[in-house]
Amino acid sequence: VDKSVQKIGNLESGGTAYPLCCDSGAFYVGGNDFAAKFTFDDKKDEFVVSDSVNVQYEEGTGNPTYTGTHDGKEIELTEDEFYHFFDYQKFAKIINFTPVESSY
């Protein structure tokens, strides 16, 4: 296999409070109301979401609804399950970077 560097996709996180992280072959991204675990699918030759969590707030009442995905299936979550997902920040390695000019 050619050992040159190749672009295979983009991953981005929700800012400095939720940095892009990696651990055991997975990448983690997050933001205020979501987080996701990406793995590389060799058959599709791209990154895919393997697990995710999300919270949406009901208009007017502000009541939260916690949902996510696991193995490609939509799931309902408790508040504790939602926040537990963010534990990846305790063990995953933060990917530091230096911004570069883009040609896009």
Image: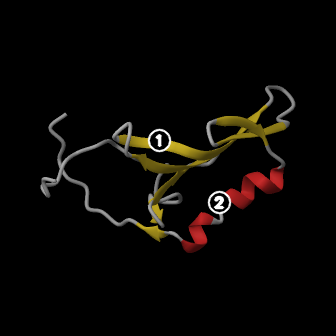
Question: Which quadrant would residue 89 be assigned to in this image?
Answer: bottom right
Residue at 84 percent across and 48 percent down: it is: 78
Viewer-side residue, 43 vs 10: 43
Dot 2: element: loop
Q: Amino acid at mark 1?
A: Val
The numbered mark, 2 or 1, whose residue comes first in the sequence reads: 1
Q: Is residue 101 visible?
A: yes
Q: How is the image coloured?
A: secondary structure
Count of marks, rendered view: 2
The quarter of the picture where the C terminus appears is: top left
Left or right: where 13 falls relative to 10: right
What residue is pinned by disc 1? 48
Classify 10 Å Cα crowding around label 2: few (below 14), some (14-19), many (20 and above).
some
Check residue 65 in the rendering and tell me which mark sits there, or answer none. Answer: none
Left or right: where 5 falls relative to 82: left
Classify 10 Å Cα crowding around label 1: few (below 14), some (14-19), many (20 and above).
some
Residue at 63 percent across and 42 percent down: it is: 71
Vertical comparison of 61 with 70: above or below: above
**Image location (x, y in percent) of residue 68:** 69, 41
Q: Calculate the distance from the C-alpha at mark 2 to the C-alpha at mark 1.
A: 18 Å
What residue is pinned by disc 2? 86
Q: Amino acid at mark 2?
A: Phe
Of badges 2 and 1, nearer the viewer stands 1
Residue at 73 percent across and 57 percent down: it is: 83
Vertical comparison of 45 with 92: above or below: above
**Image location (x, y in percent) of residue 31:** 56, 49
Q: Is residue 13 visible?
A: no
Left or right: where 71 falls relative to 4: right
Residue at 77 percent across and 34 percent down: it is: 57
